[in-house]
Image: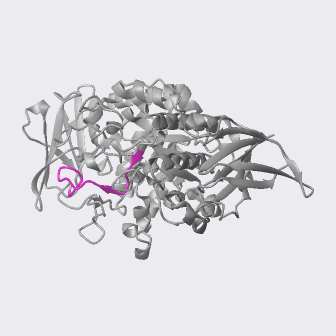
Amino acid sequence: MEMQEFYEGNSFDAYTFFGAHVQENGVIFRTYAPGAEKVSLFGDFNGWQEEEMQKDGAVYSLFIPEAYPGMMYKYVIYSSSCGRVEHCDPYGFGMELRPKFASYIVNLETYCFHDEDWMSGRDKNYNRPMQIYELHLGSWKKKGEHWYQYDEIADALIWYLKENHFTHVEFLPLNEHPADCSWGYQSTGFFSSTSRYGTAIQFMQLVDRCHQAGIGVIMDFVPVHFAMDGYGLRLYDGSPLYEYPESDVHMSEWGTYNFIHSRGEVCSFLQSAANFWLSVFHFDGLRMDAISRAIYWQGDPKRGVNDCTVNFLKRMNYGLHKLHPTAMLIAEDSTSFLKITAPVEYDGLGFDYKWNLGWMNDTLAYFRTPPDERPAHYNKLLFSMEYFYQELFLLPFSHDENVHGKATIIQKMWGDYTVKFPQCRALYLYMLAHPGKKLNFMGGEFAQFREWDENRAQDWEILQFPLHNSFLQYIRKLNQLYQQHPALYTGEYDPRCFSWLIADAPLQSVYVFTRKSCGERMVCAFNFSDQIQEIEFPENNPLYEIIASDLTEFGGARSGLEQIHPRIRNGKRTIGMILSPFSGRLFIAE
């Protein structure tokens, strides 16, 4: 790392200089604390007796011959404003489990990945299927009241992902964080994998094994705000080094401190953290949280664009693309700010994908609506395709839609228990058929009714009930078909590959559209009313049904798939079909 690059906000490798680094005859410690009066180091290696670090400008360093991997340490920072404060290492590679906060000396070079084939063959998946399974590692499965370790859970997780045909797994943040209820979004260790589930080496093993099994791995990354705990980044050197000075923008709505992206050192810190996870842990992508709060001051367009943070995002994404041309950068953004997924060279923010939160909100609002009121809301399911080609969108049913009183996806469906299932099956077929990559949160695949609680494992026992078990079989089949048919994932950002066949039937609540690519054409038909609907539309070719949401094997009432041939009506070839209430059907056109 070059210090000038660090100060200017152009460094992506600050973690190779700062922190604790194992050398041949000991460990060198370095921390950046320009406002400190004195910095000391103590740990297992010196009986927790403070040793003053040597100052060189704003950098404090100390070489400890007696130190070795596995030992714990802290920095003690003295300042006129805060006095004596013990801190974890901002660049540390490991930390104690909360509420303790000492950092660990970790030698990350001791692990050797075996995923060469995966890394050499991966890309950004623009013309590949991408069905992401989002999960919170501590509450997917538990062993009694305890968490599984990273390497312990690998076999069960990989089997489940493969069995149900998910292409990627996305972990909620696994950097160190003090509060379980923050799910990792309020971080104190931007370079430390959380010790809840084991060591950094065990975490590398999990990623490596996913890759060897053909599963991509994405992790949440939070470049906008950090936890307010005093041992972390808050007033690190006695001054607001990482955060804004106290003002109306220094704290976020979540009770965290906002990063001040106008400081080059802060930009280098965050860029280096993003590069760290992609480089050292071989992640295939980063989903970046709360980008709306990065674009606008406090996420409010009325306050105006935060130019410093927007420029930081551009610089970070541009640099990460240069370093990792096949890794994905994904924005969680609810704004209408333009060019989120345009290249930085064309004045974009440089993300590869953007969560389509408009599609998510409109779709779920529609399915909450009673059937007799749906005709008035018919355009909610048409609107997404009016703006779809403005960005490279990903369709998310994420953790945020399954918690905090919002109800799970199936619970959101209108009606009672039995009526919710056919609607939810039709919803997921509609999601599959709609252009855009897919993301679903754990539990949705077997129609879990209970809201997610980070302290409890998923309700796996409900799979003994036929409706839930058949729902999982249905999602498994959808995911499998998705990967088998290029028309569903290739060219989806090309407007020539999508067209409406029926988009003017509000009284019937019927929608029909086509997807085509690579010589394959598919017809997707939906009836979201509670009545049987008979429909007809122009079509020259026979249609071969490949899946339907109302089949008996999935809990419906229809016994088998159909072939439908065109008929001549008024000199035109048309297809006629009957759609069950709350159903979807997917066909290949010959």
Total labels: the figure holds 0
Check the image and name the residue furthest to the bottom. Answer: 302
Figure colour scheme: one colour
- Tell me residue 318's x, y (percent): 51, 52
Check the image and name the residue furthest to the right. Answer: 571
Near-viewer residue (174 or 396): 396
Q: Residue at x 11, y 59 (%)?
A: 82
Magenta part, dominant SS: loop
Residue 53, picture quadrant = top left
Residue 399: tell me if it is visible. yes
- Tell me residue 222's x, y (percent): 37, 51
Residue 351: tell me if it is visible. no
- Tell me residue 478's x, y (percent): 59, 38
**Left-right relation of 329 to 196:** right
- Tell me residue 267's x, y (percent): 38, 55
Q: Residue at x 34, y 28 (%)?
A: 202
In magenta stretch: residue 223: yes
Per the rendered image, the range of residues in magenta is 220-235
In magenta stretch: residue 464: no
**Left-right relation of 12 to 73:** right
Near-viewer residue (553 or 26): 553
- For residue 459, above or below residue 502: above
- For residue 249, above or below residue 460: below
